[in-house]
Amino acid sequence: MSATTVPVASGRRPVSDAWTLTLRILLFYRNSPGLVGISLGAPLVLLVMFGYVFGGAIRVPGDESYISYLTPGLFVLIAVNGVMATMVGAARDLQRGVTDRLRTMPISRAATLLGEAVADLMANVVVLAAMVGVGFAVGWRVHDGAAKALAVLVLLRFAIVWVGFFLGMLCGREEIAAQAGLLVLPVSTVSNVYVPTAGMPGWLRLIAEWNPVSCAATACRSLFGDTAGAAATSPWPLVHPVVATLGWCALLVAVFMPLAVRTFSAHGR
């Protein structure tokens, strides 16, 4: 979210309003290409650091390479990290008065946030495409159809964005949102994104296996054909990762979309 604006259509036309607000954010991205670069930079650093520095010391199930194990997890990380950028953007617009200005316009409240979510998805697809290219360059390969896996990643990002909207407006200030966004790191770290959970202490392994991030990473590995799947003794979300991930996404959207729209509409009252 930013202070960049474009003329907003009058009247309560949700689709038109959402598309107008999407263009607003896309214009901001066009004028700030560094944001997309930073979004891509962090996963690239992690891919190099874990894949080549620590990868030789990490063993993964089966005969697959560590790069094949890590890369789908980093795709999930890109989607999950969207909560931090969205939190900061929502708090920045709130602090600078952009949210108040949008609220005074005759536009749909839900469409305002929906437009920003769609713009975020478009930017995220660009980042994912670049990351897929880098994955191929370092030896990762798709062994099954990629369309379903990419659809799950886009849906996950869409769900995460609404969490970011709500938390960002709850923080109210850009500095607070930036610090609070760091709390996402333990959620992504205590998972099977980087390493299998088998070597973790019992209590930590339990947390990691029930972590939705682990569920999403396992789903992507399965859909890309990078792994045969979790053991039968694993928790239900890891045995049925695709269904569980879709359930988590539906739950996050059902809970946080209304909360975000309500918080946006009620700001300043």
Image: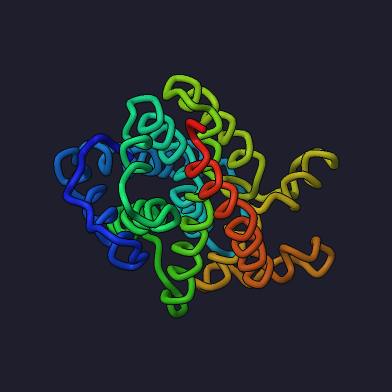
Task: Please provide percent x and percent y for residue 191.
Answer: 65, 46
Task: Please provide percent x and percent y for residue 255.
Answer: 64, 54
Nearer to the camera, 96 or 64: 96
Nearer to the camera, 14 or 142: 14
Residue 133 in view of the camera: no
* Snapshot quadrant of residue 121: bottom left
> In the rendered view, does 226 fall on the left or right side of 46?
right
For image coordinates 57% across by 36% down, the residue present is: 184
Residue that lies at the very extreme toward the left in this rendered image: 31
Nearer to the camera, 66 or 93: 93
Task: Please provide percent x and percent y for residue 181.
Answer: 51, 31
Does residue 172 sit above or below 246 in this rendering? above
Give the color scheme: rainbow, by chain, secondary structure or one colour: rainbow
Does residue 233 sit above or below 266 in this rendering? below
Task: Please provide percent x and percent y for residue 200.
Answer: 75, 41
Residue 205 in view of the camera: yes
Numbered disc total = 0
* Snapshot quadrant of residue 43: top left
Residue that lies at the very extreme toward the top in this rendered image: 175
For image coordinates 62% across by 34% down, the residue present is: 186
Check the picture and name the quadrant holding the N terminus.
Answer: top left
For image coordinates 37% across by 35% down, the residue present is: 100
Residue that lies at the very extreme toward the bottom in this rendered image: 145
For image coordinates 39% across by 25% down, the residue present is: 95
Nearer to the camera, 237 or 45: 237
